[in-house]
Image: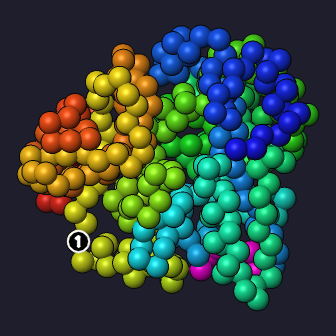
Amino acid sequence: MQMNQEWLEFLKTAGGVLADGEVSHFGDSQLERHRVATGNVVTDLSHLSLIRATGEDAGSFLQGQLSNDIRLVSATSGEIAAYCSPQGRMLAIFRIFIRDDSYFLQLPADLMEPTLKRLRMFVLRAKVTLEDVGTQWVRIGVAGPDTADILSAVGLSVPDLANACVTHAQITVLRFAGPVPRFELIGQATAMMRLWTQLRARLLPVGASSWSWLDLAAATPTVLPGTVEQFVPQMANLDLVGGISFNKGCYPGQEIVARMHYLGRLKQRMVRARVQTEIRPQPGAPVYAPDFVEQSAGTVVDSQSGLEGGFDLLAVVQISSIRNGELHLDSPSGPRLTLLEMPYPLELGSASAGI
């Protein structure tokens, strides 16, 4: 992962401890992890990257490649969308917004190179340029019950609705869905260093994993290197969080996605869970259930250290196994998963569950 060097040096001066190319913590990882659930926090988001799409055909090109309706993206309204293989399996999930008349697609930095390479293969004669601009823009995440007021107090415009965005004074503010008020701030390094200093007086700095934990709490799906081409979008609840348009027209994998929607063939859904184990479950790790015996019944999407020990995680699991309620990590006799409440209604065939 590459990080803006000016920003990197600033974070080190601000007390950031780096590990594996991202900010691990700011001196007290245990305090940070507990504060993220109920307090007001700020974090660096350099573990995410950005693709910029420019040119007169940029919108129509993206419309023909992604699962959501790109025509609905504007300077004040963003969205999430999947990039799928022809078999309907997700290669990446983007958070999309417009700034300075360009489309920006945010995704995990570890997926930037292969995703950008594949997208460029399909540009053909379209008048669109796709660029990796991850090191050109600094991204900050803020979360907590008072963050909207805090952002207003430092002079930023604050969107009222999830997925809404606004750009003011060269800083773009995106609002995320979820049980905790959460915003992403995007701008050039100099402006963001000044903003970080202002925010740090009111917010506790935390590491990148705390932001990922908030994604788990919001049951926001992601695709990571260990889960590329593992899930059809609905398996990861992308339809439940507004990431699929079923009337926008063709894109790679659209027939499979539509068939699953209209014919009711969905057999897996994503759930939140907790597991008591000392080793972090990796994205792509198998989940087992008695009704599937020795065969895997699901797959871990992502996991992060839990607030009370163990790990919290998202996993895509067979609906029948979710109903039965007994799930195990890594093997049929592995550590048992405890299902957690979902922040949105989860449709399980003929029944709706709030697990």
Q: Residues within 10 Å of mark 1 (few under 14, many from 20)?
A: few
The magenta region covers: 57-64
At x 76%, y 50%, the residue is 134
Residue type beneath disc 1: Arg
Instruction: Assign a secondary structure to mark 1.
Output: loop
Q: How many marks?
A: 1
From what the image shows, is residue 146 above or below residue 327?
above
Residue 218 drawn at (x, y percent): 44, 39
Residue 142 on the magenta span: no
Q: Give the side of residue 236 with respect to residue 127, left or right.
A: left
On the image, the x and y values in percent for residue 309 come to: 36, 18
Say above or below: 132 vs 62.
Answer: above
Give above or below for 329 relative to 202.
Answer: below
Q: Which residue shows up at 78% across the image and 24% down it?
A: 11
Measuring 38% from the left and 55% from the top, which residue is drawn there? Answer: 236
Q: Position of residue 40 (x, y in %)?
A: 59, 20
Residue 20 shown left or right of residue 294 in the figure: right
Res 323 seen here: no
Farthest residue, direction right: 190
Residue where numbered disc 1 is placed? 265
Q: Residue furthest bottom?
A: 125
Q: Quadrant of the C terminus?
A: top left
